[in-house]
Amino acid sequence: EAGVTQFPSHSVIEKGQTVTLRCDPISGHDNLYWYRRVMGKEIKFLLHFVKESKQDESGMPNNRFLAERTGGTYSTLKVQPAELEDSGVYFCASSRWRVEKLFFGSGTQLSVL
Amino acid sequence: KQEVTQIPAALSVPEGENLVLNCSFTDSAIYNLQWFRQDPGKGLTSLLLIQSSQREQTSGRLNASLDKSSGRSTLYIAASQPGDSATYLCAVESSGTYKYIFGTGTRLKVLA
């Protein structure tokens, strides 16, 4: 069974540019989460999808961040325009049910210069 | 607001030693607690999940306990090996939410 896949693994962009991160969850996992770790801080929740519906986006920093999950399969997280403080590692995780271990991808290291 | 603290921040032990990693949380109204392992440059791997109604979970050399009333969980690693070297993260899902609050982790190094 394939794990959670994220790409790109690294992205270096300049301030003001747009970046789109992609996450492919494990097949059949309805729950999909985005988390982020900025340097030196703990991992923080961004948002949660159940199938294609956003259940909780309370962790999204501001309206420069847009997440989608069309068709309830893969998800994208777009940052537009990117700012310096957006740099960090963006993780995607999925699970079939709520009471189940979370399966994480390897993350996307985003550097905004 | 739920806060999760892990002590110690870093730990170095000789191979074969039994060790305990600590996690404390401020709000006892939790739904689940998970212990994760992260290797450098990799994603997180869930080691153990404890539901709020459970007191402990075991997997191989790992044992995690949960005491909701005192806001604590411990991860016990028996007979540590160099391959156990990694960062261990505790994460708490508060009741009524689907989001985990993470601690900052304990960086473990097991010396051969």
Image (cartoon, coloured by chain):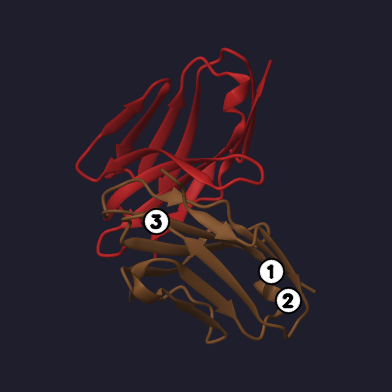
Q: Residue at x 38, y 44 (%)?
A: B34
Q: Label 1, on which residue?
A: A87
Q: In the shown orientation, is residue A5 left or right of residue A97?
A: right
Q: Are marks 3 and 2 on the same chain?
A: yes
Q: In the shown orientation, is residue B75 left or right of residue B13?
A: left
Identify by letter the chain in brown.
A
What is the chain letter for disc 3?
A
Q: Which mark is residue A76?
A: none
Q: Position of residue B64 (x, y in %)?
A: 37, 32
Q: Position of residue A65 (x, y in %)?
A: 54, 81
Q: Earlier in the sequence, mark 3 or mark 2?
A: 2
Q: Position of residue A25 (x, y in %)?
A: 43, 57
Question: Is residue A77 shown above or below B91?
Answer: below
Of the chain colours in the picture, the one used for chain B is red
Q: Residue at x 51, y 17 (%)?
A: B18
Q: In the shown orientation, is residue B7 left or right of residue A87?
A: left
Q: Which residue is more in the foreground, B30 or A44?
A: A44
Quadrant in which residue B55 is drawn: top left
Q: Which residue is more in the foreground, A105 or B101?
A: A105
Question: Is residue A81 shown above or below B72?
Answer: below
Q: Label 3, on which residue?
A: A94
- Asked if disc 2 and disc 1 are in contact, CB closer than 8 Å, the reply is yes
Q: Secondary structure at mark 3?
A: strand
What is the chain letter for disc 1?
A
Q: Which residue is more in the foreground, B96 or A47?
A: A47
Quadrant in which residue B27 is drawn: bottom left
Q: Amino acid at mark 1?
A: Ser
Q: Is residue A56 visible?
A: no
Q: Amino acid at mark 2?
A: Leu
Q: Label 2, on which residue?
A: A84
